[in-house]
Amino acid sequence: MVLSAELLASVCAATNDGILVAGYDAGRCPIHYVNAPFSQLTGYSAEELLGQELVYVPLTQVEPDAWESVRQALRDGVECSFKLRTFSKEGRVFWNQLRLSYVSGPSGITHVIAIHKDISQQEHVKNVLDKVSLLYREMSRRLEFTNETDPLTQLKNRCHLSTRGEFMLGAAKREKLRLHALRVELGNFKLLNSLGGATLSDQCHLRVAEVIKRYFSRATDIAVRMSDGEFVILCVEDDDNRIWERAEQMRQEMRAVQLQDSAGRTHEVSVNIGIYSTTPNKLTTIEEMIQNAAQLVFQMRNGPEINEQTRIQS
């Protein structure tokens, strides 16, 4: 079939990308026209392609499922665009943006136009950017973990409390949630440090942190190592009694911890906990809650358990 000069002119004017024009007859699409950019892109000459099916087998050895979608689109006469990989004659695999459009006559579709564009460079850049973005997110996550995590206990640090803690406080204010601040202090930490030095004090921090994690590790809990022998827990809980019970169980488990110094001597851990519970208003601050809980620690030092004198409700 000879293409009209008008049709060829229309095709050539449409784009400078690689172009194939094929007939459209009873599901068959034999190639009638190949432009020079397509031959340069694929390495196939017009003589090799004329008369071949539009979905030419040597060009479609990569991603057969995607090319089957192209065949289905041709069978249905659907104008569409595909991004797929394609083999050149020399074996080079390139990313190919394929667009299908049709020419119709009085009796229906007469020709199909396939426009091929090499988008390998764009895909390469996109792939690099995706990798850089992924690396950036991973580095940010690790940096956040490093900056907001205590390296010894793996609990959060003050930086985390000032960021995530403020977020939790804001949510509690908006939703009128019950917020609790627990101040945990190791009463005999200085003695342990003087008896066993850094090794014993590190062991003490690690063991206490392990207990804290067992009792306060929910998404609505923030457990922070503030300094040597001092921890803060911020949590959301609608039932005050449930918080007090958890804190008392935690305290008893901490008191059961046995530490051993380099001389083989065994030491217990003395723990004091103050709890401040409130439904925060617009004036409530994290610092205020922690200070109120810290004041109660002094009372806790004289009591055997967490009781009404070692907690404040508001």
Image (tube, rainbow, N blue to C red):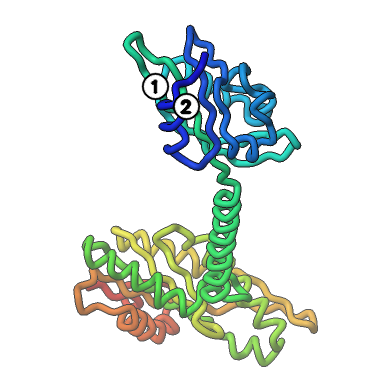
Task: Give the answer, above or below, for where 254 lies relative to 72.
Answer: below
User: From the viewer's perspective, is residue 192 above or below residue 32?
Assistant: below
Residue 305 position within the rendered picture, expressed as x and y whole percent measured from the top left: 43, 72
Three-letter residue code for mark 2: Ile
Q: Position of residue 244 (x, y in %)?
A: 37, 65
Which quadrant, please, contains the C terminus?
bottom left
232 or 104: nearer the viewer: 104
Q: Residue furthest left?
A: 282
Q: Which of 191 and 134 is in front in this view?
A: 134
Left or right of 289 in this view: 271: right
Q: Is mark 1 on a helix, strand or loop?
A: strand
Amino acid type at circle 1 is Val
Mark found first going from the N terminus, 1 or 2: 1
Q: Which mark is residue 113?
A: 2
Query: x%, y% of residue 227?
Result: 52, 84
Question: Disc 1, disc 2: CB below 8 Å?
Answer: yes
Secondary-structure class at tag 2? strand
Q: Can the viewer see residue 73 in this picture?
A: no
Q: Where is 101 relative to 254, above or below?
A: above
| Residue tagged 1 | 103
Q: Quick one: label 1, few (<14), some, or many (20+) residues within 10 Å?
A: some
Binning the other alpha carbons within 10 Å of mark 2 as few (below 14), some (14 to 19) or many (20 upward) gives many
Numbered tag placed on residue 111 in the rendering:
none
For the question of whether residue 234 can be seen, the reply is yes
Alpha carbon separation for disc pair 1 and 2: 8 Å
**Which corner quadrant of the image does residue 196 belong to?**
bottom right
